[in-house]
Image (spheres, grey):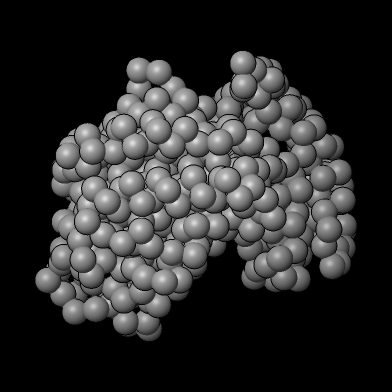
């Protein structure tokens, strides 16, 4: 896949020794003056210090740089964690010649450990000196933000909007502790389109709802979830306005890119062997569709059965039945596994065979379609199976 650099956005990485030895674990993203920024963060009450600081800084001014580290979440660290996050922002600001509030911090990794600020201080000059506006810098950054990920997640595309070529490039990280309540563990998307901040925030909110807020690995919401969208404005075009054709075109391109990033997290989920798409439709409300989809997606019994390639559809039916929805007529419920009808009108489909069910779940990609009624409401959620390897990874996470 071709990765397109974004004009006005420079990146650099360095092995700071935050936690890992012999690999890059610190990233700086510098954006040119005039860049718009939108972000969404975790709603976890124990939101990490960098999340709190980034929120505060964004309320004061547009950023000139993002500072990211992997291996240490700087979460559950109290007032000292906040002071450390601000001090690291100040170190980068000093090297770039900007105000501390123009730096947004991001961290991911182990919770409850203090940041090794001296490591940041020592590595910062070298990292800033390496800032580049090229595809290799994006590739290195996507690798540097990884923790339990086995592959980096980086996508890019170009699109034509009102006759102007626009670039979108983004990276994400995450494999476990994934049930976003706004975004994903960490995601960064940049574009050279001209978009003012309020419009950019609307675009991010809407595209997040259809991408990062539609994935789950284990139902655990992280303390550090953050998704940030930068628009450098380097493209020669008029600002994109809400309600315009240009807005719709950009929204489509952005959503597709963010869905690629979100789905890549599920495909790389800790211990995953299956990529599972759950489509729920026909409920009275979209919230009810979502409730059913997530109840099925996060059922340990459903996930372990699919890991074993066992079409134990009774587990799916039971999950549907216990979903917290406003109303449900079980006589209208129908379920399919990869287009194989298993339940029709609330009872076993007359044409279903165990052999057909086993074939449906034998592959790596599985679709579960659930029809609850006659409404046009629908929701799609992506998830993974639950394997022995998931348990091993999380049992050994701090060892």
Q: Nearer the viewer, residue 275 or 374?
A: 275
In the picture, measured across the screen, residue 83 lies left or right of residue 93, that is right
Q: Is residue 48 above or below residue 244?
A: above
Q: Nearer the viewer, residue 247 or 353?
A: 247
Q: Quadrant of the C terminus?
A: top right
In the picture, measured across the screen, residue 378 lies left or right of residue 138, that is right
Instruction: Where is residue 184? Give x, y as percent.
Output: 53, 48
Q: Is residue 45 above or below residue 265?
A: below
Instruction: Where is residue 134? Give x, y as percent.
Output: 16, 43
Q: Nearer the viewer, residue 358 or 115?
A: 115
Q: Nearer the viewer, residue 347 or 317?
A: 317
Identify the residue at horizontal 16%, vertical 43% (top origin): 132
Instruction: Where is residue 6? Give x, y as percent.
Output: 20, 53
Residue 313 visible in this rendered orientation of the protein: no
Q: Is residue 242 above or below residue 371?
A: below
In the picture, measured across the screen, residue 391 lies left or right of residue 90, that is right
Q: Quadrant of the N terminus?
A: top left
Residue 75 visible in this rendered orientation of the protein: yes
Instruction: Where is residue 353? Give x, y as percent.
Output: 76, 30
Identify the residue at horizontal 31%, vertical 32% (top origin): 122
Identify the residue at horizontal 27%, vertical 51% (top origin): 94
In the picture, measured across the screen, residue 26 lies left or right of residue 232, that is right
Identify the residue at horizontal 84%, vertical 67% (top origin): 326
Residue 290 found in image quarter: bottom right
């Amino acid at each position: 896949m071709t990765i397109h650099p974004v004009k006005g956005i420079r990146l650099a990485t360095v092995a700071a020794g935050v936690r890992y030895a012999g690999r890059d674990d610190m990233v700086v993203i510098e954006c040119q003056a005039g860049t718009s920024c939108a972000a969404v963060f975790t709603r976890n009450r124990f939101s990490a210090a960098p999340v709190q600081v980034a929120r505060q800084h964004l309320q004061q001014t547009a950023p000139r740089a993002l500072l990211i580290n992997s291996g240490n979440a700087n979460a559950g660290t109290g007032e000292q964690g906040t002071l450390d996050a601000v001090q690291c922002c100040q170190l980068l600001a000093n090297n770039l010649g900007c105000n501390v509030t123009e730096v947004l911090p991001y961290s991911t990794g182990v919770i409850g450990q203090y940041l090794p600020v001296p490591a940041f201080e020592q590595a910062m000059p070298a990292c800033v000196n390496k800032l580049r506006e090229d595809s290799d810098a994006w590739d290195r950054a996507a690798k540097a933000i990884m923790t339990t990920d086995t592959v980096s997640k980086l996508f890019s595309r170009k699109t034509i909007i009102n006759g102007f070529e626009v670039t979108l490039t983004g990276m994400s990280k995450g494999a476990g502790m994934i049930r976003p309540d706004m975004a994903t563990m960490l995601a960064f998307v940049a574009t050279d389109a001209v978009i003012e901040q309020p419009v950019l925030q609307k675009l991010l909110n809407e595209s997040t709802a259809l991408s990062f807020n539609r994935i789950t690995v284990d139902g655990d919401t992280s303390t550090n979830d953050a998704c940030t969208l930068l628009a450098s404005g380097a493209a020669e075009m008029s600002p994109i306005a809400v309600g315009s054709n240009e807005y719709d075109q950009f929204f489509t391109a952005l959503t597709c890119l963010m869905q690629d990033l979100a789905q890549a997290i599920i495909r790389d989920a800790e211990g995953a062997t299956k990529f599972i798409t759950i489509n729920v439709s026909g409920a009275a409300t979209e919230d009810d569709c979502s409730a059913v989809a997530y109840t099925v997606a996060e059922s340990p019994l459903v996930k372990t059965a699919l890991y074993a390639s066992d079409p134990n559809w009774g587990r799916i039916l039971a999950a549907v039945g216990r979903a917290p929805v406003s109303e449900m007529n079980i006589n209208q419920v129908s379920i399919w596994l990869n287009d194989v009808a298993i339940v029709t009108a609330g009872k076993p489909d007359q044409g279903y065979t165990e052999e057909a069910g086993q074939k449906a779940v034998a592959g790596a990609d599985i679709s579960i379609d659930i029809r609850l009624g006659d409404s046009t409401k629908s929701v799609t959620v992506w998830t993974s199976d639950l394997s022995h390897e998931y348990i091993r990874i999380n049992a050994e996470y701090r060892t």
